[in-house]
Image (cartoon, rainbow, N blue to C red):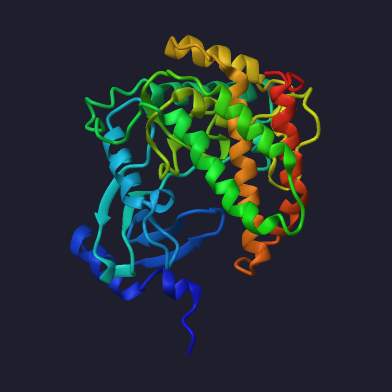
Amino acid sequence: MTESYYERLVDEDALATYLEDHLGAAEEYEIDRHQEGHSNETLFVTWGDRDLVIRRPPPGETADTAHDVLREYRVTNALVDTDVPVPEPLLACEDHDVIGSDFYVMERLEGHVLRLEEPDEFADPDARERIGEELVDTLAAIHEVDYEAVGLDEFGYPEGYTERQVERWGQQLMWAFDRTVEEREVPDLYEVGAWLQENAPEEHPHTLVHGDYKLDNVMYGPGTPPELIGVFDWEMATLGDPRADLGWMLSYWRDAKDPDPAVPELTSTFMEREGYPTRRELVDRWEDRTGLEFEHERFYRTLAVYKLAALGEMFFRRYLEGNSDDPMYPKMEARVPALAARAMRIIEGEEPL
């Protein structure tokens, strides 16, 4: 009998034994797989009267940087007593005999994750303004963490982070092009890559960075006014350039004046409504909170869109090779050139901050 994907994710009996050993016995035990994520796997576990979350890499994949859940555990554990809101991490396990991989356990938070729509209770100008303010204030709090004081001084190599980002994503793109060029070319991305190499800042501030900070990687509490209660998905966190985090967040944030989105299927547009801060207002607030300047803003916003294009092109290659049945992946044949055009607009000043 073929093992199902769920069975590859978790051995329910072995996990129950592990949880009982570490958290005590429980009469109620249920597991649900969270379907929204696209990187590490998330399991919701009811253990007695406790609601837990388990994070593990996809089955069959080794713990590279993109799937290193114990890295997530380490950073969230270091941040528990800081101004950065994170779910409380409880346990970390390197024993693959339990569920077949590294994993960690954290408390489950209850609230709103804003993906494609805003909650009804947030649908007024005051709440919308607060959503943006909480989002950028929390990013500033991440960048203000004294990473040495919380034990993260060896968590990364901040020197040269930005140049490495350009090089790394260029390599990812070239890997994808090896196969996708047989279908169509995206010449704009060669030009964007060259521009990024020429314009990468030689110096930048050194802070903790999240690596994937955006509106749908945070949670707001269930009440009003909106309060940001948790930051998730820390697997790309490291020490690096805070302005790269800001540029990434801004690449997902829409202004009412913006052209149509390059990838409409994955783009939230509700923040174009009355009350939400503009990108410029978010930047002003981040600068005020951190005391840093968003210098070279075109570079960082272009880098973010270049990374999105590289991700899309890798998805397209996986589709062409038969390695995914995700219905979004074939659409990248047209969506990646649209992202490349967006990057060119930013470079040329046609899509201003």
- Compared to residue 52, the image places residue 214 above or below, namely above
Residue 1 in view of the camera: yes
Q: How many marks?
A: 0
Where residue 271 appears, x then y in whole percent? 69, 29
Q: Determine the residue positioned at 36% across, 67% down.
A: 29
Where residue 310 appears, x then y in whole percent? 61, 45
Where residue 191 appears, x then y in whole percent? 68, 33
Residue closest to the eye, 163 or 245: 163
Q: Determine the residue positioned at 47% across, 72% down.
A: 6
Residue closest to the eye, 16 or 351: 351
Residue 252 in view of the camera: no
- Compared to residue 232, the image places residue 206 above or below, namely above
Q: Could you say which quadrant of the image residue 19 lies in? A: bottom left
45 displayed left or right of 245: left
Quadrant for the C terminus, please: top right
Where residue 281 appears, x then y in whole percent? 62, 14
Residue closest to the eye, 264 or 346: 346
Residue closest to the eye, 23 or 277: 277
